[in-house]
Image (cartoon, helix red, strand yellow):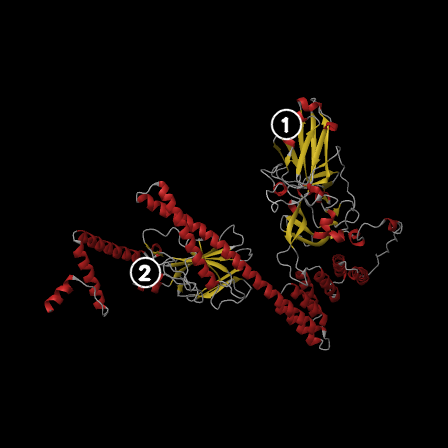
Amino acid sequence: MSSCGAWEGQVFKLRDFACVPSKGHAKGVDYVQSMGRITLSYAFRDELAALTAADLVVELSSWELKVKANKPDLDGSLAPLNGSLYGDVRRSLSWWTLEDQADGSKLFSIELAKRDHKAWNAVWKPGMSHTRKSHFGWTPHARAPVKKAEDILAKVKPGRRARQDGFVMRREDLCAALEDGQDASTAIYRIHLDKAALEKACETVSMSDLFGVDVMEQYLKIFIRGDEKSPILMGQLFDQIVPDKTRWEIVKAAALPDEESARVGVYNTCLQVTLTKEKPSKTHWPRLLEEHEQVLEREAAPAIEELSAKALRAPSPDRSGWSPQELAKEFKAKADGCFRNSAWRDAAVYYARAMGHTPEDEKLYSNRSACYVKLKKFDKALADAKKCATLKPEWSKVYFRLGQAHRGLRQWEDAITAFKEGRFREPANKEWEKEIEKTEEEQEKWDAHVREQRKLKREADMVTELNEATVVAEREAMAAVAEQALKAGKSRKEAGELALKGAELAKQRVHEMAAQKKKSAMVEDDQELDQAAPYRIVAEDGTLHSKSFAHTDKGMYFMGMTLMNFKSAPSNQPWVELRHPGKLRWSQGCGILRLKVFLPSVRGAQDLDVKVTANDLWIGTVGDTDPIVQGCFERKVDPNGENYAWFLVPDEDPPILELTLDKDSSEVYQTFSYGTLLWPRLFNDDIPLGEGLFEADLTDLPPELLEKFQTAQARSDEQSRKERQKRQMMTEEEVAEETARLWNDEFARHGIPHRVDSLEDRRIDSYQQ
């Protein structure tokens, strides 16, 4: 998003939000737009050049523009200015003009204030808009009445309307929270806006005209236009930036955690300002901004009657001879006053200034921790509480601050432990029991919420998988049936009809298997299954595999015989996706295992700890006892095998660790059936997989074993070929006789008291009779 700013002296001013496309041409109409407004321009030439503004009738609704002349025969020339607009507009903030040009033509211009803060990809809505459909419904139920005056076309008088930066909203009402962050090259401020206050402000002014930002090399000011003397944020930056590379935009961001109730999935509208650090300053700043005292001392634009009272300000005292304790006392008094007035952010700033003079005062850290709790910045609250605990561990109030911060971060056990420690140090205080009970209640509510969200997500994932699997199955079935029909001599029309029937049968089969999977693997009645978490069968990149829904009623995969591949590796070997406890995917050949593990944010391979033994796998981060993946293998592996390796896949977000392991060499060399080398599951507590999911990839076997299999396979193929040639020269009666004899020999070898009737048996019976 470009800045759309302008220099004024040494100050770079941001007053409008640029967008893409910034300009264009549609139906003979040129347009220029920002995120807040779009201006249409249309040249009046020939017979239109004789028109004046008084000859035009411009009508506008929230979604439609209509321009007519007092001469009906000219309406066809004005057709490019008529139609349904791409987005909704605010008629009260829009205007139009008709101005003479140097070449004798006239330029019609109309500026439309957008209702939504977004870019338009075009000027006109193609086809019939949803609003027009509701107005012209073909039944009484389909026809919706016009409910708002903005939906009705009304005349707009000619003339420009100046943009006025009038005071419309106090910063305390509009701004809900403040976030900041940085990396090596940028610093970001994100101001969360209160939804109700923003809607009220936008009733009288466009969102694009609501804010302003002034930037200098080491200065930042963010304010509500019309109230510049009471800025949202103002002060001196820690180091220099490049002013004209400053970007600002309106974004959606997750709401900050609420102390009383966990607001999951709630997003706020935010003003985000991104500053680009000067090249010598591209490093981590210890602090982003030293806020100006004026920001803290004024809450909002004063009322008119208050101006006279505030015109004279008492001179500041001489602080040159003050001790650190006296300076800290003054800042603490200001902070306490802000705290009593619920100005939590200002109080936190004053406490920080007091700490600069008396850094070992534990009460300052305790008080600032309380401010951060009120601001929902629980990570900062926890850091201050821990610092306070190191300064005065015997103080019981320390553990109240620790408990509050841990509870805000939903670290329930740590919060309860902190409150119990406070109760131990202050047993007569009954408030500790109330805090413990409150924490336990919030934990129960949160756990119930998480279970419900997990259930909804699993159900949504199941629907998504079912849709994807249906598409894959229908496509494969149609291709296979059509190909077979054409080979059988069917016409293309007949082949198409058969393909559609095959697709319908494939769809029914997928839905039947999906119902069985849901019965065996999904959460039922809010209770988790005793078995391990359900798995998904996917391709290597995570997309749904065509074998995904072939499950039995026990939740196991089953497809039949295992396909043996020794000439080339399988082209579409499936991967099994599961959580153990973190998310991973695994696949296999006859001799190796391959794993992809999804990691949290890590700086590099140096942050990972990978431990592999013959029976176990443990993957985690250095210094953290909680594993990302941990389990006991179904069978043994060779941790010293020649293929053992792991690495981080480059350019993946989140990071992915790829791991290759050799299966135990003794098992590989001693097997008599290479199909048995395929593992039914990765870890011994997973759901067992059925035969036929994985193809027996023999290409990763040692060369001598692969040669042995190829020799045995060639011998078997030769024997089968001779058998087929032999049967080609036999009559049908001789073939039936040979088949019966082979089956009878097999029954006798296994002691089965059954025989297939053959000519030889009938001859023996006749002889005995």
Residue 76's tag is 1
Q: Amino acid at mark 1?
A: Gly
The quarter of the picture where the C terminus appears is bottom left
* Residue picked out by circle 2: 674
Q: Position of residue 400 (x, y in %)?
A: 70, 69
Q: CA distance from mark 2 to mark 1?
A: 80 Å
Q: Nearer the viewer, residue 69 or 539?
A: 69
Q: Please give left or right for residue 640 compared with residue 648 in the image.
A: left
Q: Nearer the viewer, mark 2 or mark 1?
A: 1
Q: Position of residue 472 (x, y in %)?
A: 43, 50
Residue 276 seen in the figure: no
The quarter of the picture where the N terminus appears is top right
Q: Quadrant of residue 362?
A: bottom right
Q: Nearer the viewer, residue 51 or 161?
A: 51
Q: Residues within 10 Å of mark 2 (few under 14, many from 20)?
A: many
Q: Is residue 337 above or below residue 45?
A: below
The structure residue drawn at horizontal position 63% and vertical position 64%, both measured from the top left corner, is 410
Total numbered badges shown on the rendered structure: 2
Q: Position of residue 43 (x, y in %)?
A: 67, 27
- Callout 2 secondary element: helix
Residue 336 seen in the figure: yes
Q: Residues within 10 Å of mark 1 (few under 14, many from 20)?
A: few
Disc 2 or 1, which lies upstream in sequence? 1
Q: Nearer the viewer, residue 500 or 85?
A: 500
Q: Is residue 675 above or below residue 221?
A: below
- Callout 1 secondary element: loop
Q: Amino acid at mark 2?
A: Tyr
Q: Quadrant of residue 695?
A: bottom left
Q: Please give left or right for residue 449 compared with residue 355 in the image.
A: left
Q: Position of residue 218 (x, y in %)?
A: 72, 46
